[in-house]
Amino acid sequence: MKLDIVRYLFAIMLCIANMIIYGLKVNIATAIVGMVKAKKGDGVQSDASQECGFEMDEATVDIDGPFDWSTTEQGLVVSIYFAGYLVGMFPSGYFADRFNTKNVLLVCVLSNALLTLIVPTVAHILVVLYIIRFFTGLLAAANLPVVNVLVGKWVVYEEKSTWVAIIYAGTSLGTVVSILSSGMIVGTMGWEAVFYIHGTLPFIWCVAFWWFFADNPETQKYITEDERLYIVNSYGHRTPESTKQKIPWKQIFTSVPFLALVYTNTFGNFCWYFLLTQLPLYMNKILRFDIKSNASLSCTPYLLNAIANPLLGKLLDWGRQKTYWTQTQARKIAVFISCIPPSICLAVIAHIGCDRTTSTVFLILGVVLCGAIFVGHLVNQNDLAPNYAGILMGITNTPGTISAFILPALVGALMEEGHSMARWRYVFWLNIVAQISAFIVFVIFGSAEIQEWNQAFGD
């Protein structure tokens, strides 16, 4: 069977891969609510905020789990994943560029599924859980570099923003499915079932991807010659020979658009990772939603984001084709959307007080707007140099992961004496400053033009 839509099917498989990796990345942020013992008042500062006086059934809101972990230890359980993610980012980016990219992605997904399955077994020994979480992040680090490389091989220039948006919509859809199902599973079957169920399902994707798809259109079996030629002859197409190219390290690290991208990736990810890792905790401890309501509300913005991003990508492609803006201006529009409006949302939440409904609306809106990073700076590596997209993603997303590591740990340390809006406010403003600075740097120095050093052929 040969089809003229193989590039679309491949892109959908990448979307599902993103769903899997992001789902396994964030499920513990919800599951941990049911893993730890609820701290009750008895003369000690409660672990939950009571300053707004929300009426609730504490037995429902605060599930009494088996583990007596401090807030710092809880923060580390979440953030240690991103320490591994950070360490693995550059090596995985290099491997994605130099080796068979399809196989690297298969190893990434399969290893994450296996490590997720053993979480309930190792969770009783906190140090071992830290180690497993670290290695899960280490092996998941290949996800974004690999996807970036495969975009250069399979997505044609005229369709880039649209299909990149669909591919990266998987990150939002995975977050939706993971948070929503985790909340439902914890509430009905217990926290252990979260990891057993989520760890088993990815094996279906692994078999389908291994059997039906190749690393590049040049070697793909199930494809028409017309579609193969359409892809390989498109502007900026990454050929299999790109793995033999000499890496122009000097040109990369002296490129102003690339250095601007490094800064933007570092500080423009703060809001996304903050809300990704800490939103369920804030909804539980400050806004006082129970686990099922928490999960439903926390996943809502990611569902909206999965719809909004492809629409934004289509709009950016349409405007470029109509010459209303260039590719560079399209990227800057997306970076603006991901940085400035979310900062305004966080500022409102930080100072709105106990208005539960308005805070929830602005939290949802903040996540939806932050999601524009996937059609903004997180695809810019492929704009600058498709032949080195994996390596560039490895370089830029190494510091870009710092926020995912430090923010959960910072929240845990700040909340040792109890959750309060005043303490959370410090973290909100840290995110606001980071996002605004990222936009300023990218709008001045950023570019989406293919750089001359993309064709630095060597022996």
Image (cartoon, rainbow, N blue to C red):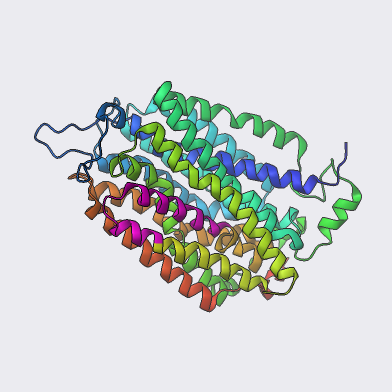
Side of 74 relative to 339 (left or right): left
- Residue 374 position by quadrant: bottom right
Q: Is residue 364 magenta?
A: yes
Confirm whether residue 95 shows in the render.
no
Q: Position of residue 297 (x, y in %)?
A: 43, 41
In depth, the one of 59 and 177 nearer the eye is 59
Direction from residue 397 to residue 65 in the image, left or right: left
Residue 271: percent from left, percent from top: 42, 57
**Residue shown at 43% from the left, 42% from the top:** 298
Q: Residue at x 49, y 31 (%)?
A: 181
Does 173 lie within the magenta span? Answer: no
Give the quarter of the figure containing the N terminus. Answer: top right
* Coordinates of residue 363 in the picture (x, y in percent): 41, 51
Residue at 35 percent of width and 39 percent of height: 77
Majority secondary structure of the magenta segment?
helix
Q: Which residues are magenta?
A: 345-374
Residue 439 is at least partly visible in this image: yes
In this rendering, the answer to whether 426 lies above or below 448 is above
4 left or right, relative to 285: right
Residue 352 falls in which quadrant of the image?
bottom left
